[in-house]
Amino acid sequence: MTDPEVHPEVAETAEEIATMEIRGAATIAAGAAGALATQARESDAETPEAFWAELRQAAKRLYETRPTAVSLPNALRFVLADVHGDTVAELRESAVESAAEFQRELDQAQDRLGKVGANRLRDGDVVMTHCHSTDALSCVKAALDQGKHVEAIVKETRPRKQGHITAEQLREWGVPVTLVVDSAARRYLNDVDHVLVGADSIAADGSVINKIGTSGLAVNARDRGTPTMVAAQTIKLHPDTLTGHTVEIEMRDETEVIGADDRERIQGDPDGFTVENPAFDVTPPRFVDAIVTERGQFPPESIVVLMRELFGRDTARPWEG
Ligand code: RUB
């Protein structure tokens, strides 16, 4: 049997995730859930089997876009797990509702973790950010809502400069922002009360997988005595790491790092010149002071307990059929 076509809007969402128009682990999860809802709503499948085949194919297409943020497979798994029914109409309604419920829970989790993270921030604190994390920013927002004054030193975050998005958001909230290039971070760490970052995945040993440059920042922060706080909804917990798998680090295209002209000038013999563009890195748990989730704050070494509770039973891959 040939694979069913996915709806054009699903293909579009997959493309937007791959090209990072939709980016950041939580936003990717919400986008993927929305795409599954579209596939279900627009399906013209005539049998439950055909409907399921389409939905699985849509999930597979979304799954294959980016490998590192576990929120993506977790979102697909959560949405598909709640689809029930005997007829196409029942399945359709249930898939649309499951996606909507998942998106609601995602928003609530972010709000809840923001309040937990805000408790760590005191009036007048300065945070240093890396990349653009909606979970990390929700902690700042909650602190502002509590009437605290917060300032930010924002790392630019090469090569895609997601720090600019963070700076824009913080300025919208009235937070004083100092933007620095990534390599200037250490110089400013003495002026910082917290390093505050998000996560794409968290492994069972408490390692944090986040935007490339996070691990160097955390090591420098420890050297300067500045605590590193990771804001991550439990959808960022990577269940496969419970059984010894490692998290795949996405390697992106070299054109994000170097333009054609520079490449031409530097390369000389093309065989002797390579560009690498890893999008994420791994921060060992010993450099992380706290992981803040919607279930409370955890030392990284104990996150495995929460992971077992939430994901112990189910690491299925329903998109594989
Ligand atoms: C984004 C990134 C973010 C996490 C958390 O990388 O590393 O820190 O995804 O974001 P990219 P959030 O820009 O390559 O997607 O807290 O919004 O889930």
Image (cartoon, rainbow, N blue to C red):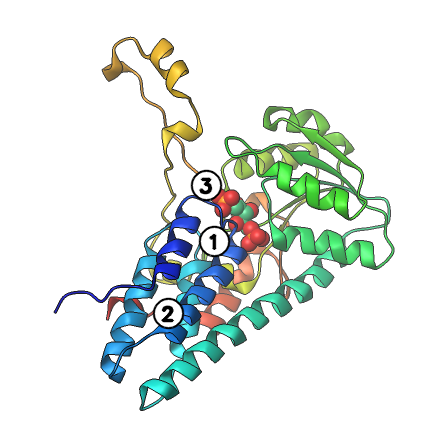
The quarter in which the C terminus is drawn is: bottom left
Q: Residue at x 39, y 81 (%)?
A: 92
Residue sitting nearer the eye, 265 or 72 = 265
* Above or below: residue 253 compared with residue 23: above
**Res 201 label:** 1
Residue 94 occupies quadrant: bottom left
Q: CA distance from mark 3 to mark 2?
A: 30 Å
Mark 2, residue position: 39
Q: Residue at x 37, y 9 (%)?
A: 265
Q: Circles 1 and 3: CB distance less than 8 Å?
A: no
Q: Is mark 3 within 8 Å of ligand 1?
A: yes
Count of numbered circles in the view: 3
Location of residue 311 in the rendering, given as x and y in whole percent from the top left corner:
44, 70
* Above or below: residue 255 compared with residue 230: above
The disc labelled 1 sits on which kind of residue?
Ser
Q: Residue at x 59, y 35 (%)?
A: 217
Residue 115 occupies quadrant: bottom right
Mark 3, residue position: 280
Location of residue 285 in the rendering, given as x and y in whole percent from the top left corner:
53, 48
The disc labelled 2 sits on which kind of residue?
Gln
The disc labelled 3 sits on which kind of residue?
Phe
